[in-house]
Image (cartoon, rainbow, N blue to C red):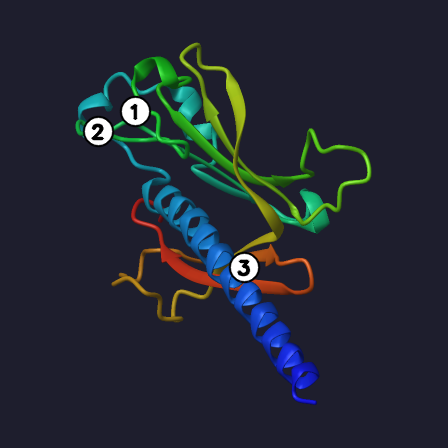
Amino acid sequence: MLIGPSLKVSSEMLIKQVQLEQFQLARSEADRGLELIGRAIRIAGYQNVRSTDARSPKNSKRAALEIQKGVGLNRSDALFIQHEISDGIDFDCIGNVLSKDRTKNNLAHQGFLLEAQAGLAKGTRIKGGSLMCQSLDRQGRLQNTTLMNGVHSLLIKELDSNIKSMEATSSSQKLFKVSIQMDLGQSISEFNRIYASRNLH
């Protein structure tokens, strides 16, 4: 008589355990994406004082940070940033060490955008899209690389400078709220961070 209820309880516990594991995996992936985007926001517009004399006039005409609203999958936003290379070791959004050959007009480029997942078999249940990293290859050409799948949307918004962020800010810094929504199949979970620029005025 108790076998049925026991199986039901075990089944419900198993479902909850699977859902918890899915959420934890989604949170880990979202945290990784948010950290990469935050790092890009912090470095956007960086100018190396050593390269001032060699700086191209074209550089001043380009936005150090550009947000394109609603251009991606599920009307997601896209973020594009440019910066000069420091005297230390810099990385792009897929972990490549930045060098002069990975720049154009002496500027490194990083972008984040959401696209539909590619290469799926016909009839496959699609869970979200692919968060893409846009960077420059060794010939200075744009390349898109998948950072993660299962992303429902990417939203980026510039905030009022009076809003507090996770980082210490000055009045001249700009604040950006970044939201990544992960598709868990049966639900959508949203993860948010607020980042402060360091080189945008």
Q: Residues within 10 Å of mark 1 (few under 14, many from 20)?
A: few
**Element type at marker 1?**
loop
Residue 191: x and y in percent read: 50, 62
Image x and y of residue 78, in percent: 58, 43
Q: Name the residue located 76 percent from the left edge and 41 percent from the top edge.
A: 124
Name the disc covering residue 89, or none: 2
- Residue 19 visible? The answer is yes
Which residue ends up furthest to the front in the rendered image?
Answer: 1
Instruction: Answer whether labels 2 and 1 touch (C-beta < 8 Å).
Output: yes
Earlier sequence position, callout 2 versus callout 1: 2
Instruction: Measure the C-alpha gap from mark 3 to mark 1.
Output: 32 Å
Q: Residues within 10 Å of mark 2 (few under 14, many from 20)?
A: few
Amino acid type of the residue tagged 2 in the rendering: Ile
Q: Is mark 3 on a helix, strand or loop?
A: helix
Q: Which amino acid does label 3 sit on?
A: Gln
Q: Which amino acid does label 1 sit on?
A: Val
Q: How far apart are marks 2 and 3 (CA)?
A: 35 Å
Q: Can residue 178 be seen in this view?
A: no
Identify the residue at horizontal 52%, vertical 62% (top origin). Answer: 23
Coordinates of residue 13 in the picture (x, y in percent): 57, 75
Q: On the image, numbered disc 3 is attached to which residue?
A: 22
Left or right of 85? Residue 37 is right
Identity of the residue drawn at 27% across and 16% down: 54
Q: Report the disc number at residue 97.
A: 1
| Separation (CA) of disc 2 from disc 1 | 7 Å
Picture disc at residue 183: none
State which tag comes first along the sequence, 2 or 3: 3
- In the rendered image, the residue lying farthest to the bottom is 1
Give SS at disc 2.
Answer: loop
112, above or below 156, in the image: above
